[in-house]
Amino acid sequence: MHYDNFGIVMDFEVKYYPLRTATGEVFAAAVWARDITERKQTERLQQELDRKLEETFTQYAQQQFLPQHASLDMGMVQLLTGTSQVRVASASLQVFHVNSAGHCTQLEPTRRPLGCRLFPPMPLTSMNCSCSRATTCI
Amino acid sequence: MKGVQRQVDEQKSLLDNLINGSNNTIMAIDRNFRIIFLNQQFTAHYKAQGVEVGIGTDVLSLFLNDAEREQMR
């Protein structure tokens, strides 16, 4: 339950229990409420941070990242579109670089935790797993 | 008889302590939405907002405006 009363916005987890007479008739209801305002505020803050992170990544990829690299694998796509910390944290980032001969080099897949620590996405160690054709890059 | 009374008093004391020792707000309302029981946390919560609540308070008045309250009845 979310309500704004007396100028204060609060969130409550509310449970109701029927109170019965000996014959089973409900004569009242017991109401149990837990103040979860702090938890909800944290969740909203997390959502806002996720949104900003996604926005920043998207903007960064569009302006700087994509022109330098052939493409991104699904891990990065997930990273760019992910909205939760868990998904971002578990995303696998793989970067492909196209060399002057038109071949691509897969750089080391990396797992990194959430946040701007992914900036800049380079440097990553090359695994020397050159693709035979540039088209093998997604 | 006194033994039974003592047992009842002890049970009541135990329940009171359990309910009032909670950080959660607990109350009971009758079929007319009037409070018939409330714990200290509930009272304190509304007192902090300048609202006095007690046995007999219409609980709808705490959450709803007049129009919403009439709609509920």
Image (spheres, grey):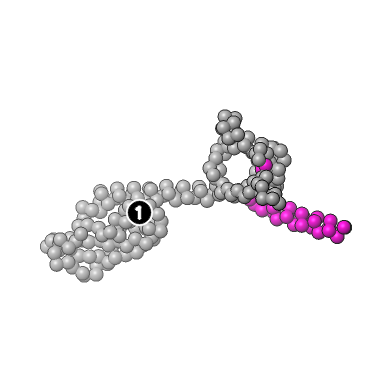
Residue bounds of the magenta highlight: B1-30
Res A10 quadrant in image: top right
Confirm whether residue B27 shows in the render.
no
Instruction: Give the position of the C terminus of chain A as an image quadrant.
Output: bottom left
Res A116 quadrant in image: bottom left
Please provide percent x and percent y for residue A9. 55, 40
Q: Nearer the viewer, residue A73 or A21?
A: A21
What is the crowding at mark 1: few (fewer than 14 residues within 10 Å), some, or many (at least 20)? some
Q: Amino acid at mark 1?
A: Gly
Please provide percent x and percent y for residue A86. 40, 58
- Write the residue at 73% across / 55% down: B15
Q: Residue furthest top?
A: B67
- Write the residue at 12% across / 62% down: A101
Indicate whether residue B6 is drawn in magenta.
Answer: yes
Rendered position, A1 above or below A70: above
In the image, taking residue A50 as reference, residue A134 lies left or right, namely left
| Residue on which disc 1 sits | A82
In the image, taking residue A114 as reference, residue A107 lies left or right, namely left
User: Magenta stretch mostly in which secondary structure?
Assistant: helix
Q: Chain of mark 1?
A: A
Res A79 quadrant in image: bottom left
Please provide percent x and percent y for residue B62. 62, 37
Q: Nearer the viewer, residue A48 or A6?
A: A6
- Write the residue at 20% across / 57% down: A70
